[in-house]
Image (spheres, coloured by chain):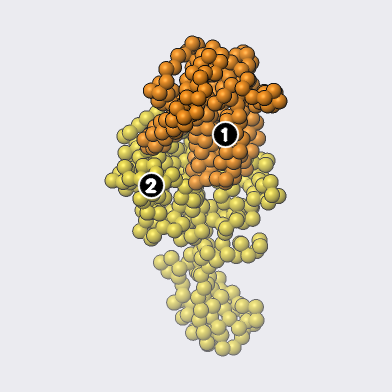
């Protein structure tokens, strides 16, 4: 294992992040605050509680998931797409590193950034509402797995994308709708029966439900099912990446 | 001398069906400077990219330092530094950071002294904290070389290192390559410029349409180039070359209207004066004199034409 190479990629990607630290830090703080103003104060004041949790607090796990998923995906996809776009990928391809090391470097950095942003949102939220975390270890596990799996997904998107439009396509057309419709801001039980059934086909539901369970002990689906879903998703991404590197798809000619 | 890079029966056909390399065989000796000459699209970059692991071979084998570049890619690639043709660098990164990154990527431990040495050697030390986008094209080229040298490669590939570089910088670049040779680094460079190959290479390989047409020591090629011909037009055609003149290796042209004499223009005595004296003694009258020299460019153009 070429750990020095992994460290080099990770560090290089993180410096890109730190160069724009203020941006990385301020934008989630502002967007979280806006969500609290709109959903928490304006709308939330008319909703007493959802399943025994104050609405303001209820949306915190969903908010964190929303940002973590989109940030992990976009950071990882950009991280690998950019070198492809400017051509610096030649160096990684000609270096004594295997696919696993390349993936750990890029995905690890993207996941770290998403984790950082998730933490910032959690702390910002704490300024607005009282947050209790019933299962802190489960919370950390869900958060880490979500950062990791969506960074893996983003990595695949970055390899697949041939231009900047394609890079934006999947996050915009698939991930954002799935997150919004996956119960970020409501409990599935609030939906009409037909939509409840449909929603259960949304993989993001399981992640948000499990994550919310770790905060408040209430969930839309059994927590083990949530854990199974995210494990399955992570596994699928790993297999996809392994296949990509084995065949050299869109990377090596 | 042992071959540090050995290419055997290498074929590469791209998905589009384009045959970029056809059964290429090439041994590169340790410590030499090899110039790979060829027109655009000849397969120079594909050959380099295959050795460096960016392009997967369709068939055939490549070893670097005895390590197969596919099966034993780690050991092979550790020995290689690659300077690509395009100025591919991240604009917002600083010079020193991008060079440090390269060293780490190749699994080498941190060594600031070496990084400083490389940057100084390439006159980049003063620019080490500059963002790459602030640099000129020639400076960017140096950064690419610094990246390739950051991990102390045994074999350095320079893909068109002096394309779009001014004369002074080109000379500097040649100096760098020369210094590297002194430290035992094997260098392979591709170029369009024949003068460049002449100026720094030990051996020259000519590639065309995926075939290696010729691999020859430069001095042997130069010797061929050094040969000049003098053509003496006679006022009256002759049937036979007089004995005294034939002794000098002079030949008659096909129709007998001229004499052709080959000589080494770099030799101390070319024998031209003696020949002219002999002509006078034999009573042969000449109407015109012309000399001709085939240079590397001509050899190259000739090869390319013959195989087009």
Q: Residue at x 54, y 12 (%)?
A: A217
Judging from the image, what is the letter of the chain drawn in orange?
A: A
Residue B132 marker? 2
Q: Can you give x and y, in whole percent of width and height, for residue A100 in the image? A: 55, 27
**Looking at the picture, do discs 1 and 2 lie on one chain?**
no
Q: Colour of chain B?
A: yellow
Q: CA distance from mark 1 to mark 2?
A: 35 Å
Q: Quadrant of the C terminus of chain B?
A: bottom right
Question: A46 or B142, which is in the foreground?
Answer: A46
Residue B121 marker? none
Q: Can you give x and y, in whole percent of width and height, for residue A28 in the image? A: 43, 32
Name the image quarter holding residue B72: top right
Q: Residue at x 50, y 46 (%)?
A: A86
Tag 1 residue: A176
Which SS class for mark 1? helix
Q: Can you give x and y, in whole percent of width and height, for residue B48 in the image? A: 55, 46
Q: Can you give x and y, in whole percent of width and height, for residue B204 in the image? A: 52, 53
Q: Residue at x 60, y 14 (%)?
A: A223
Which tag is nearer the camera, tag 1 or tag 2? 1
Q: Is residue B241 above or below residue A127?
A: below
Protein chain holding label 2 = B
Q: Is residue A193 above or below residue B62?
A: above
For the residues bearing labels 1 and 2, Cβ distance under 8 angstroms: no
Mark 2: few/some/many CA within 10 Å (<14, 14-19, 20+): many
Question: A21 or B79, which is in the foreground?
Answer: A21
């Amino acid at each position: 294992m070429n750990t020095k190479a992994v460290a080099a990629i990770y560090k290089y990607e993180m410096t890109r992040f730190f160069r724009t630290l203020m941006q990385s830090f301020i934008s989630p703080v502002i967007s979280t605050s806006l969500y609290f103003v709109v959903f928490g104060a304006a709308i939330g004041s008319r909703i007493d509680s959802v399943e025994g949790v104050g609405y303001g607090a209820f949306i915190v796990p969903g908010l964190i998931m929303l940002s973590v998923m989109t940030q992990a995906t976009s950071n990882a996809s950009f991280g690998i797409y950019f070198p492809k776009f400017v051509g610096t990928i030649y160096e990684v391809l000609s270096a004594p590193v295997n696919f696993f090391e390349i993936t750990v470097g890029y995905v690890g950095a993207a996941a770290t950034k998403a984790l950082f942003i998730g933490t910032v949102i959690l702390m910002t939220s704490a300024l607005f509402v009282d947050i209790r975390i019933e299962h802190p270890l489960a919370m950390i596990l869900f958060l880490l797995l979500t950062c990791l799996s969506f960074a893996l997904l983003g990595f695949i998107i970055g390899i697949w994308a041939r231009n900047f439009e394609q890079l934006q396509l999947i996050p915009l057309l698939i991930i954002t709708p799935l997150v919004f419709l996956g119960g970020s801001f409501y409990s599935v039980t609030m939906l009409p029966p037909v939509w409840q059934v449909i929603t259960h086909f949304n993989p993001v539901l399981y992640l948000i439900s499990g994550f919310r369970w770790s905060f408040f002990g209430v969930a839309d689906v059994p927590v083990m099912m949530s854990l199974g879903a995210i494990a399955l998703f992570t596994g699928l991404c790993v297999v996809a990446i392994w296949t990509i590197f084995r065949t050299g798809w869109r990377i090596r000619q | 001398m042992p071959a540090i890079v050995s290419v055997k029966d290498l074929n590469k056909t791209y998905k589009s069906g384009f045959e970029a390399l056809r059964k290429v065989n090439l041994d590169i000796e340790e410590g030499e400077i090899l110039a790979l000459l060829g027109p655009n699209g000849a397969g120079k970059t594909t050959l380099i990219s295959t050795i460096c692991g960016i392009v997967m071979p369709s068939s055939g084998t490549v070893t670097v330092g005895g390590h197969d570049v596919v099966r034993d890619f780690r050991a092979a690639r550790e020995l290689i530094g690659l300077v690509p043709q395009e100025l591919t660098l991240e604009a917002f990164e600083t010079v020193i950071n991008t060079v440090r990154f390269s060293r780490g990527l190749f699994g080498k431990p941190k060594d600031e002294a070496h990084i400083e040495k490389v940057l100084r050697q390439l006159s980049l030390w003063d620019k080490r904290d500059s963002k790459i986008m602030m640099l000129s094209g020639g400076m960017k080229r140096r950064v690419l070389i610094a990246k390739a040298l950051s991990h102390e490669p045994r074999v350095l590939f320079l893909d068109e290192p002096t394309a779009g570089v001014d004369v002074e910088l080109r000379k500097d670049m040649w100096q760098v390559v020369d210094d590297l040779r002194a430290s035992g680094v094997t260098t392979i460079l591709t170029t369009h410029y024949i003068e460049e190959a002449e100026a720094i290479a030990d051996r020259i390989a000519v590639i065309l349409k995926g075939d290696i047409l010729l691999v020859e020591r430069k001095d042997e090629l130069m010797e061929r180039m050094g040969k000049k011909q003098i053509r003496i037009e006679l006022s009256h055609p002759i049937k036979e070359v007089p004995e005294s003149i034939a002794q000098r290796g002079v030949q008659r042209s096909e129709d007998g209207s001229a004499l052709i004499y080959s000589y080494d223009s770099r030799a101390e005595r070319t024998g031209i004066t003696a020949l002219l004296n002999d002509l006078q003694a034999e009573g042969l009258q000449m109407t015109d004199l012309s000399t001709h020299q085939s240079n590397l460019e001509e050899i190259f153009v000739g090869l390319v034409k013959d195989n087009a």
